[in-house]
Amino acid sequence: MSAEYQSRTVERLRPFGSTIFAEMTALAVSTGAVNLGQGFPDTDGPASMLDAARGAIADGFNQYSPGPGLPVLRDAVVADRKRRLGIEYDPATEVLITVGATEGIAATILGLVEPGEEVLLIEPYYDSYAAAIALAGARRKAVSLVPDGNGFALDTDALAAAIGPNTKLLVVNTPHNPTGTVLTHAELTRIADIACEHDLLVLTDEVYERLTFDSPDSSGRSARSTHVSLASLPGMFQRTVTVSSAAKTFNATGWKTGWALGPRELIDAVRAAKQFMTFVGGTPFQPAVAHALNHEDAWVENLRTSLQAKRDVLSSALADAGLDVKASDGTYFVCADISSVGGVDALQFCRTLPERIGVAAVPVSAFVDDPTPASGPSNWTTLVRFAFCKKDDVLADAASRLLTL
Ligand code: PMP
Ligand code: GLN
């Protein structure tokens, strides 16, 4: 960058710069560090899905798909949600195929929130939410997760108290990036009550919905965290847009194939925005993802159990390195507090970690508005997120490097 470099980015996007994931991946590449920063797997999805994509290209699925997405994928998304979660959507009007969950999130906010209206987030929150709110000219407010045992919980009273007359939309993400928290049925029921009472719209980001793990409960017994889809709770279908994607379920982050589900009047609004951003996504990926949704449940279950074992390996390695490791009940991620090894600022820690020990990670402070919220006991400045969605030998390599901390 020359000394005269001057940003021409519009003001509302200027605070966002480049994402923390891009920054830490670039650092990992330039230093040759093991990249436990950006959450992407280093192995491919089911072979039959990859074959189906190649087959789709060979069979001429190479032009624009219909605006809502190929019917075969809309049918598969709807069938999958009915089978696993018992929620019924109309494939003709209540599902929209998007360019990853990211586009579904942006289009939901752009299509449903007026400039100046408020969107309520639960922090830490995935970075694209704040940027999409800024694109929409809307305002954001964040309620912090609070420590709960060895993990985190939602203070639902604080959530209710944060709602004002201008609050239009609440964004919920479970299983939660970056903490690995899986919101409980009780928390989600309370969120549903609050949303109904205040007549809020809800955007629920469920990209890690299939990746929930067994964890010891308070009595020490191991229990599987269960994913509950907010739209299934009483009063929620009519007010909820659910977003998910193939990225995390089928190790296909580069395919950018996702979906938004909801009642017709909400999905129409999402489509109104989506059609002028990309019109449609990549056509040949759609029949391939449909095939995987219809036929690869066993592969996904295998992915889930292998990620659970990887979580355990990385959590032990972080503990052996002296960090205070938090519980992770789902996703690709485990967080650890660095204050036990003298760390005071997770961002600085992550900027120097690749050079110091050859491991990249991301600071949780990048996912919050206020790293030291006055309203809650959480302090996000010393928390670091590590991704465990990597091959066993890569994790073993990272583990031995972490021991040099
Ligand atoms: N939401 C969350 C919570 C994520 O972690 C990610 C990253 N996979 C996304 C949305 C974006 O998903 P996609 O790659 O399908 O756009
Ligand atoms: N979802 C991925 C993560 O949290 C990153 C996606 C991205 O780089 N935008 O690490």
Image: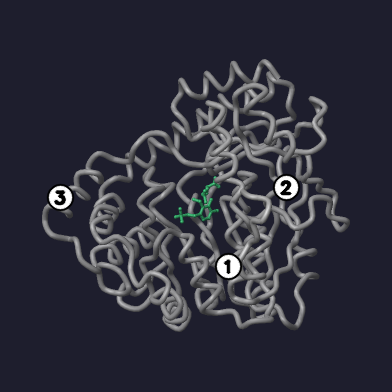
> Residue shown at 49%/72% (left/top)?
107
- What is the x, y in percent for residue 369? 75, 58
As measured in the structure, the alpha-carbon distance from the residue carrying label 2 to the one carrying label 1 is 19 Å
> Residue shown at 47%/81% (left/top)?
269
Which of the pair 167/1 is nearer the observer?
Answer: 1
Quadrant placement of the C terminus: top right
As measured in the structure, the alpha-carbon distance from the residue carrying label 2 to the one carrying label 3 is 43 Å
Vertical position of residue 121 compared to residue 323: above or below: below
Helix, strand or loop for disc 3: helix
Tag 2 near tag 3, CB within 8 Å: no
Helix, strand or loop for disc 1: helix
As measured in the structure, the alpha-carbon distance from the residue carrying label 3 to the one carrying label 1 is 35 Å
* Residue 132: mark: 1
Disc 1 marks which amino acid?
Ala
Q: Residues within 10 Å of mark 3 (few under 14, many from 20)?
A: some
Vertical position of residue 114 compared to residue 11: above or below: below
Is 140 on the left or on the right of 339, as rendered? left
Mark 3 vs ligand 1: CB below 8 Å: no
Disc 3 marks which amino acid?
Gly
Q: Which residue is labeled 3 in the image?
A: 55
Q: Which residue is labeled 2 in the image?
A: 365
Is 113 on the left or on the right of 369, as rendered? left
Is 382 on the left or on the right of 168, as rendered? right
